Image (cartoon, helix red, strand yellow):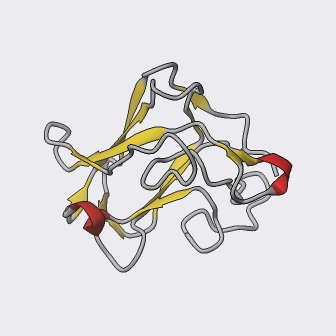
Amino acid sequence: MAGSLDVVSLGDGGTVTVEFAGNKIVDGPGADFIVFENPFLIGGAPDNPYAELGTIEVSDDGVHWSAFPCAATVYPYGSCAGWHPVYANADSGNIDPTDPDVAGGDSFDLADIGVRVARYVRITDRPDVNTVFDLDAVAIVNALCP
């Protein structure tokens, strides 16, 4: 399965910040949000992804940031984004992009880094690996809506 081609390429060491205006990501049971890149499995092997890694940080105010540890440069890539294939597809709409059990992508739990609420997600391409992160989407799993 190939990922979407409708992506924003961050460039080597580039960064993008996504704001969820009007709602927030909250710490709930399990994964709280999912980041979608467009990796694929080489030869269909789950332990051999073509990964384009990014570091994920969150903030409630856009000033103070908390990072998920992304230090891996070889499989498995731990708390980095950009290494799990995407199965949810906006064009077909048959897989819920907010369900971490079926959507694919890389799921993140705010509890893992001691954060309760976040309005912003910042993604930074890993310049120490020879690929470029291509952001497809970010989906909130546990949302606080006004």
Q: Residue furthest front?
A: 74
Please provide percent x and percent y for residue 94. Answer: 76, 67
Q: Residue at x 54, y 66 (%)?
A: 98
**Residue 92 higher or lower than 122, as above or below:** below
Q: Residue furthest right?
A: 43
- Give the total of numbered labels: 0
Q: In the picture, which quadrant includes the C terminus?
A: bottom left
Please provide percent x and percent y for residue 27. Answer: 28, 70
Q: Is residue 70 left or right of residue 52?
A: left
**Residue 134 in sight here:** yes
Q: Quadrant of the rendered structure where residue 79 is?
A: bottom left
Q: Residue at x 51, y 50 (%)?
A: 77
Please provide percent x and percent y for residue 52. Answer: 59, 36
Taking depth in this image into account, of 25 and 44 the one nearest to the observer is 44
**Residue 49 higher or lower than 87, as above or below:** above
Q: Residue at x 20, y 39 (%)?
A: 62
Taking depth in this image into account, of 138 and 73 the one nearest to the observer is 73
Q: Is residue 84 left or right of residue 92?
A: left
Q: Residue at x 38, y 70 (%)?
A: 142
Q: Residue furthest bottom?
A: 29
Please provide percent x and percent y for residue 117. Answer: 22, 61
Q: Is residue 41 left or right of residue 139?
A: right
**Residue 146 in sight here:** no
**Residue 65 higher or lower than 44, as above or below:** above
Q: Is residue 62 left or right of residue 4?
A: left
Q: Quadrant of the rendered structure where residue 72 is?
A: top left
Taking depth in this image into account, of 25 and 128 the one nearest to the observer is 128
